[in-house]
């Protein structure tokens, strides 16, 4: 016992030290954020809900990703947005709780910036008895109108699985191909595709809310102490669509021992991967071996908030969105408050030794909270005390249209777009 505590105490102290900014600024104190700040101008004239016809299913949207549509000549025509929402999240959330009612299904949506509309995808061939609670979603680009695969993390009633669909740009139907299962899809959260039939997938916890008896406490300890237990894997699935039982051909852990691995993204060049470590407020960058999909750590960037999802823009800047005040998020879950703060920032490599900007335009600049990273700049794109937009979980920048999107884990309007 003495040996155990002699080993454990310094380890816990080390983990706490690594999460010191997050503990102090995002848990123990509450920062003073504006109602709404948008880096391109006034929020009220630039930003509006993504879905112009409000729909009671279009809310509580955890993830969104670009679905790139190329024409026959290989020119990028449009970056549509695929959005995963779950209006039943207050009754079923395997990451934060509660686990009350898994029956009402979540939904998937496609937003077209060209048409300006947001359409709900109809799930075709989806087994009627399956429950559906979508989190991470990503679809392979479509070329000259062909259908492409979409993968969706599903926090289903029994266990977490990954659903594979086929999606065509000319219809609003997602055809279910099969359900992918693996013993190590423990708490899968976000996906980044490396081919039509392979992807990286994060696991946010090793101890989950689903565990009998200890599920109420142990996952919270894993979160608050920033225990580096969770991991990212690279998964290959059988290109033969009819293979269902053993559709997962390989599952390789490529980034072990990261605290609360949450969002993940693959850079446009394909040679960098970003993983958000929520509980220590950090994004880890890795260089990727494009042949083997192995990852080698290259840099870490401390953020002024615990990042949720991360997405690259087309120029290779990373956009991270997150939750600047964890206790308010917990109060929102307990229905004690209606909104919780948002912060979205971009992380860009410093080119040619130019000295980093200090995010001086933001109402609350990142550099007031955390030391600036050595080889990157952090720029605030959006921040809010929750009044303008609540619980930001994903931010995306579309370099084609200039649109900036934010989705909200518990946002009543689901997602916002700023022009
Ligand atoms: C979930 O588990 C129950 C009980 O083990 C089983 O009857 C049911 O078929 C399972 N549902 C799915 C969708 O796998
Ligand atoms: C669509 O076309 C691209 C490019 O030819 C190809 O890589 C992809 O596998 C195709 N998708 C499907 C679902 O066949
Ligand atoms: C990728 O991994 C392979 C096999 O280990 C190795 O031969 C190759 O040099 C690696 N590529 C890079 C760019 O590191």
Image (cartoon, rainbow, N blue to C red):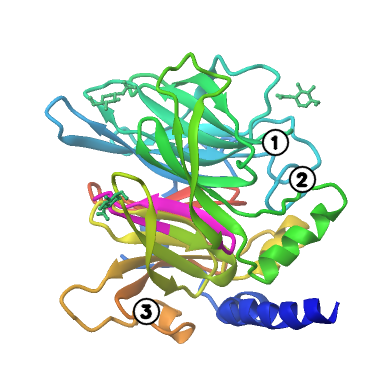
Q: Are marks 3 and 1 in contact (CB under 8 Å)?
A: no
Q: Are marks 1 and 2 in contact (CB under 8 Å)?
A: yes
Residue at the extreme left: 73
Q: Position of residue 4 (x, y in %)?
A: 79, 76
Q: Tell me the SS state at disc 2.
A: loop
The residue at which mark 3 appears reads as: 373
Q: Tell me the SS state at disc 3.
A: loop
Q: Position of residue 294 (x, y in %)?
A: 38, 51
Q: Tell me the SS state at disc 1.
A: loop
Q: Is mark 1 within 8 Å of ligand 1?
A: yes
391 w.r.t. 299: above or below: above
Q: Residue at x 66, y 30 (%)?
A: 105
Q: Is residue 351 magenta?
A: no
Residue nearest the viewer, comparing 297 with 93:
297
Q: Is mark 3 within 8 Å of ligand 3?
A: no
Q: Are marks 2 and 3 in contact (CB under 8 Å)?
A: no
Q: Which residues are magenta?
A: 258-274
Q: Residue at x 19, y 73 (%)?
A: 351
Residue nearest the viewer, comparing 381 with 338:
381
Which label sits on residue 159?
1
- Res. 352 visible in picture: yes
Q: Is residue 272 magenta?
A: yes
The residue at which mark 2 appears reads as: 210
Q: Is mark 2 within 8 Å of ligand 1?
A: no
């Amino acid at each position: 016992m003495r040996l155990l505590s002699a080993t454990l105490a310094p380890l816990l102290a080390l983990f706490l030290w690594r999460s010191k900014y997050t503990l102090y600024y995002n848990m123990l104190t509450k920062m003073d954020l504006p109602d709404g700040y948008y880096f391109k101008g006034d929020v009220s004239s630039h930003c509006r809900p993504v879905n112009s016809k409000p729909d009671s299913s279009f809310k509580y949207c955890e993830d969104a990703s670009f679905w790139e549509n190329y024409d026959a000549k290989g020119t990028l025509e449009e970056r549509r947005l695929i959005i995963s929402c779950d209006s039943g999240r207050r009754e079923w959330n395997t990451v934060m709780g509660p686990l009350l009612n898994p029956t009402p299904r979540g939904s998937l949506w496609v937003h077209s910036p060209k048409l300006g509309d947001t359409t709900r995808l109809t799930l075709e061939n989806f087994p009627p008895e399956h429950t559906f609670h979508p989190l991470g979603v990503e679809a392979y680009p479509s070329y000259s109108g062909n259908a492409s695969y979409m993968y969706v993390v599903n926090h289903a009633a029994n266990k977490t699985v990954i659903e594979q669909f086929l999606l065509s740009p000319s219809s609003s139907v997602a055809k279910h191909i099969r359900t992918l299962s693996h013993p190590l899809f423990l708490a899968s959260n976000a996906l980044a595709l490396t081919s039509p039939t392979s992807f990286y997938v994060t696991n946010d916890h090793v101890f989950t809310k689903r565990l009998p008896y200890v599920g109420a406490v142990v996952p919270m300890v894993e979160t608050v102490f920033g225990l580096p237990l969770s991991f990212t894997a690279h998964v290959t699935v059988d290109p033969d669509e009819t293979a269902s039982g053993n559709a997962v051909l390989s599952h390789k852990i490529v980034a072990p021992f990261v605290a609360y691995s949450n969002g993940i993204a693959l850079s446009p060049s394909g040679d960098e991967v970003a993983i958000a470590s929520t509980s220590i407020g950090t994004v880890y960058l890795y260089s990727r071996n494009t042949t083997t999909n192995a990852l080698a750590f290259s840099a870490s960037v401390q953020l002024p908030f615990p990042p949720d999802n991360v997405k690259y823009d087309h120029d290779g800047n990373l956009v991270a969105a997150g939750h600047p005040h964890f206790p308010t998020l917990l109060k929102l879950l307990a229905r004690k408050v209606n909104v919780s703060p948002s912060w979205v920032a971009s992380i860009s490599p410093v080119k040619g030794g130019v000295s980093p900007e200090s995010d001086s335009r933001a109402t609350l600049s990142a550099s007031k909270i955390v030391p600036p990273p050595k080889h990157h700049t952090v720029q605030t794109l959006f921040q809010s005390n929750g009044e303008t937009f609540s619980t930001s979980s994903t931010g995306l920048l579309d370099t084609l249209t200039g649109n900036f999107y934010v989705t909200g884990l518990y946002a009543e309007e689901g997602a916002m777009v700023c022009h």
